[in-house]
Image (cartoon, helix red, strand yellow):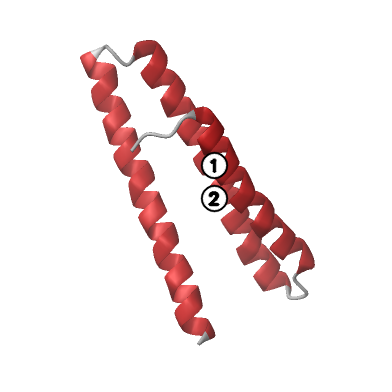
Amino acid sequence: MKLEPREIIDTCSQHYFNWKEEALAAKDPEKAKKYMEKAFFWLELQNNLLILWTIDKTMGNDPIVKEKIELAQANINKKIVDYASSILDDITEKY
């Protein structure tokens, strides 16, 4: 499923601001650092997805570019899976 720019920005921004607020509210510096890393993940994800969307719309008809877009998307998907795994680890640690 490919998202449109507005969906990318809305989703990633919401998560970025939520984690940023958690970081600013955290009393423990280690927790604040962990929360900021999560916030930056969403900021980086937003940028990467918007760049891929732009490349796809402007040069996506080129088979070589299309292949590179698919590889980049696979790398992004791996990062999302790793992120989800870290969230599950955090939840497991908490309980």
Q: Position of residue 37 (x, y in %)?
A: 59, 57
Residue at the disc numbered 1: 44
Question: The residue under label 2 is which amino acid type?
Answer: Phe
Instruction: In the rendered view, tell whether residue 57 sits above or below residue 24.
Output: above
Q: Residue drawn 48% across and 34% down? A: 48
Q: Residues within 10 Å of mark 1 (few under 14, many from 20)?
A: some
Given contact means CB atoms under 8 Å apart, are the residues at marks 1 and 2 in contact? Answer: yes
Q: How crowded is mark 2: few (under 14 residues within 10 Å), some or many (20 or more)?
A: some
79 left or right of 18 in image = left
Instruction: In the rendered view, tell whether residue 60 sits above or below residue 89.
Output: above
Instruction: In the rendered view, tell whether residue 4 sits above or below residue 37.
Output: above
75 left or right of 31 in image = left
Q: Position of residue 11 (x, y in %)?
A: 55, 45
Q: Which of 10 and 23 is in front in this view?
A: 10
Residue at the disc numbered 2: 41
Residue extending furthest toward the bottom: 95
Question: The residue under label 1 is which amino acid type?
Answer: Glu
Q: Dot 1 lies on which element?
A: helix
Q: Dot 2 lies on which element?
A: helix
Label placed on residue 22: none
47 left or right of 71 in image = right
Residue 38 placement: quadrant: bottom right
Q: Position of residue 78 (x, y in %)?
A: 33, 50
Q: Residue drawn 52% across and 29% down? A: 5
